[in-house]
Amino acid sequence: MLKQQARLLTRVAMALDAAMIVAAFLISYQITGHFTHLKSIGRYSWILLCLIPIWLYLLTRFNLYASLRTRDIGEIIADILKVHVIGAIGIACIIFLLEPTGFSRLLFVICITFCFILICTGKLCIKLILAGIRRRGYNTRNLLIIGCNPKSEELIDLIKRHAKWGLNIIGVMCEDGYGDKTFQGCQVVGSTLDIVLFCKDNPVDEVVWCTERGTVEEENTFIALAEMGITFRSVLDYRTLPTTRTELSLFHSRIPIVTFHFKAFDSGQLLAKRILDIIGSIIGLAITLVLLPFIALAIKLESPGSVFFSQDRVRENGRIFKCWKFRSMIADADELKQELLDRNEMSGAIFKIADDPRVTKVGQFLRRTSLDELPQFWNVLRGEMSLVGTRPPTPDEVASYENWHRKRICIKPGITGLWQVSGRNQIQDFDEVVRLDIRYIEEWSLWLDIKLLVKTIWVVFARKGAL
């Protein structure tokens, strides 16, 4: 029943947002003077057909159709802004590919602006109306907190500071029985042995478990509450938990499994990232084809050998692939590497030296401008790399990794990443490189990728370091 209600509310919210997108489109059409009658929108109607599904998908990915009860207004506006920036870039790429000329840029900008204003207004109005209703005692949830400890203390303090959430603490149960009659200003209503009985006699919507986890007592409580239809939440010790996402699912529709994810990607987000990679790699390869004759001629004139250089690199979870670059070194560079190992400036499993004698003069220019990386757009298009990710290591580097270092190869490697835009030439400690890569993996979002791509363009054109 509750699931059906939630689905219905989500569909209503999506329908309202779709209506606002249409309204923004019509307003922009009117302002720019394109609107004369309904038939006049036919030329740009395909944009509207792209806008609605892309926007609804992005709003879903940013959890803007989930309960906004405990989310701050600033956070909601920030997420809606991210949706519009990402969506605008996506639509702009579609326009570039399908209709590069004759499209009104003013109409597009005004449409996106009004979209943002209308959707923000709608979400905030709903949130403010519901907050007012909850302050009057309606649309509230009764919580029973289990455990008298720092975790429950922090939770209770947070709930009390946000009355607009409509969360009412009906009582607290301590591990050692009643003890004090109150805990953090809340009534202590019994011990952890009394949970089920208390829920039978009182209107409890949710039980929040803040005490020792993984016990038989917790499991029995979970089973009993599930039979009663009461929501059960278990607070994890997030200070020591190394995961980024946890989900409960059914394996083969039968066996319940808790999955701990150690990276921030899910299937939907991976699809969005892949679409960005395909669009970006097509644009990158187009630029590469324009520059190819000039770069190839310069490489050939200075030193014999192939224009391109390929090397075995490691991608997600140990898979090997051929990484392509424009050749920036002499032909037998790999054989000379062993003679230069004692000059390595990096600590750990990365080889890097200043004034590498193997690098040609043309190669120095290619590296300084990052033009040597252009063929990697082919790796991105093939799905072996991503536009943004971690640096792809060589197999011999991976062989010397410690266990925690291997987390940096649990995702696709990228042409650029957090390390590259954080002063790559100044970072000489490999452990610091890994920490930056892990930070990217655990904090990943499509918005972060876009920010890193913009920073990369700035780093390259400002000559602040090669990729």
Image (cartoon, helix red, strand yellow):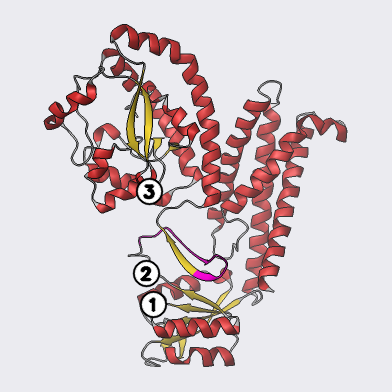
Upstream in the sequence, badge 1 or badge 3? 1
Q: Is residue 9 left or right of residue 229?
A: right
* Residue 27 picture quarter: top right
Q: Residue furthest top?
A: 301
Q: Which residue is mark 1?
A: 213
Q: Could you say where residue 197 lies in the image, as x and y percent from the top left?
A: 53, 93
* Res. 204 in view: no
Name the amino acid type tagged 3.
Answer: Cys
Residue 410 is tagged as: 3
Asked whether the beta carbons under mark 1 and mark 2 sit within 8 Å of each other, the answer is yes
* Residue 226 picture quarter: bottom right
Name the amino acid type tagged 2.
Answer: Asp
Asked whether the beta carbons under mark 1 and mark 3 sit within 8 Å of each other, the answer is no
Q: Which residue is mark 2?
A: 237
Residue at the (54%, 54%) spot, across then down: 74
Quarter of the picture containing the N terminus is: bottom right
Q: Could you say where residue 416 lies in the image, as x and y percent from the top left?
A: 39, 34
